[in-house]
Image (cartoon, rainbow, N blue to C red):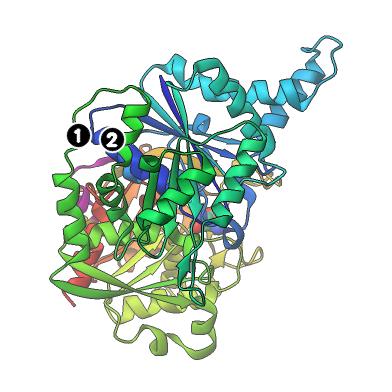
Amino acid sequence: MKYIFVTGGVVSSLGKGLAGASLGTLLEHRGLRVTMQKLDPYLNVDPGTMNPLQHGEVYVLADGAETDLDLGHYERFTKCVLTRENNLTSGQVYETVLSNERRGDYLGKTVQVIPHITDEIKRRIRSFEQVGDADVLITEIGGTTGDIEGLPFLEAIRQFILQVGHENAIIIHVTLVPFIKAAGELKTKPTQQSVAKLREIGLQPEILLCRTEMPLEADVREKLSLYCNVPVGAVIEARDVENSIYEFPLMLQAEGLDEKVCHLLRLETPAADMEGWKKIVRSIVHPSRRTTIAVVGKYVELQDAYKSIYESLCHAGGANDCGVDLKIVDAEEIEADGADKYLGGVSGILVPGGFGDRGTEGKILAARYAREHRVPYFGICLGMQIATIEFARNACGLEGANSTEFDPKTPHPVIALLDEQVDVTEKGGSMRLGAWPALIKPGSKSHEAYGHTEIAERHRHRYEFNSAYRERMEAKGLVVAGTSPNGSLVEIIELKDHPWYVAVQFHPEFLSKPETPHPLFRDFIKAAMCR
Ligand code: GLN
């Protein structure tokens, strides 16, 4: 197995995840089997309990692991199927080592960062070898070189490369080459210093991936090469992409990144055939028409909080030859000013997932607006619970209907915890998580989209549709379009007399890829285009 480590220098948010994922795309198109891993230096055991405003969305894997959003890039850009093994945090490493220590596994030894923590990190990097279904592992190290937390990971990588040899493991350092307007120049010093930091601890990157706004001219490349001890041919320019992140692999291919990597790792493969990928990028970047979708949420300040939703809308646009203009609406503003002001004129309304009651009344107003004005509506997780509450209150006359998450004393708990979940008080690990099967009702909008009746979709929630209200709502025109296989849990609701109103208890956004857009997102955009 060959190993590629991706480190980051100078500042965070350089798109290491995207760079790794894009390299994964290129290597797969060269016929290699790729898997990807993220090492996160923070002490949370998983990102599940972190606020999306701080850390971006929590990306859920099929096995129920709550992971970093970079794993979303990995799954969207490659064919790899990730599991909880693919995301390692310092918290997990310490948890394992400490429980070994309590069990007495270290037999009287002093337990230390080196070798015990670093050994555990190496064991987790190595674990993919035994599975044996990949030729290349791309491992991204979170954080920025120089961070104290990152040191054990970098030290583990140093030891690892020493063991497997430089022909089997390389480091790609993603760095910033800033353009200073006053000087009219690209500056190499920050990169020099971050590489110096790596070399101080015994790591020498083989490739520099330079994030830059301007082209890297020959003199800048030579300077970087000389001071960073990297051959000039391995100084790769990574400009900001103009239109779409899916252009990134094409840009890196043009710069020769995959060629270089294969050469260094002694991988003999044909060049990557990216014609199919180019076609998809073209349909995303140059659509023949456009539509506007409102996303009504509460984590609206941070682009990353609804990452997978935005990406899925983009894929769905590509499939319909339609550009999607996003109108990000803060649910609390709808509460203050009413829905008309923000939703008048949009062609579709999407209410995404969320926790806690801030903004829920605004989302309920948005769902009502969509139902009454016959605007296509797509509710996801909380967005389905919102749709249920709205319908119960305003179409079924169940005054005060709510979710027990927002109003524990509601007279009509149309969304509630299942009986067996009522005792759960711990915040970590009490949710329905990961892929669950469901059955689709023939003839429904969802059936039309999926084209079959058996599906499996990823979940992340505690509360459920309360089936005690099912008949009353169905009598008023609610369609239960999907249930768990035994019929007990409601997974999809639709409205009978509406052009397209579909709300799902799961997260379809975790299954959409540019080549295979999710069918519900695709049909949502199709419906929006008809307005
Ligand atoms: N807060 C809701 C629940 O726990 C919805 C969760 C979500 O949207 N992911 O059921």
Observer-nearest of 479 and 131: 131
Q: Secondary structure at mark 1?
A: loop
Q: Quadrant of the C terminus?
A: bottom left
At horizontal 46% and vertical 35% (from top left) the residue drawn is 206
Q: Quadrant of the N terminus?
A: top left
Image: 526 above or below 160: below
Q: Is residue 395 magenta?
A: no
> Which residue is at the front of the view, 7 or 451?
7
What separation in Å lies between label 2 and label 1 (alpha carbons)?
8 Å
Q: Is residue 67 visible?
A: no
Q: Amino acid at mark 1?
A: Ala
In the image, is residue 455 part of the stretch drawn in magenta?
yes
Q: Quadrant of residue 234?
A: top left
Q: Is residue 43 left or right of residue 450?
A: right
**What number is the disc on residue 414?**
none
Q: Determine crowd level at label 2: few under 14, some 14-19, many 20+ residues with C-alpha closer than 10 A.
A: many
Magenta-colored span: 446-456
At a point 44% along the width and 56% down the height, the residue shown is 211
- Do tag 2 and tag 1 residues touch (Cβ < 8 Å)? yes
The residue sitting at 28% across, 27% down in the picture is: 32
Q: Is residue 461 visible?
A: yes
Q: Which residue is mark 2?
A: 259
SS state under label 2: helix
Residue beneath disc 1: 271
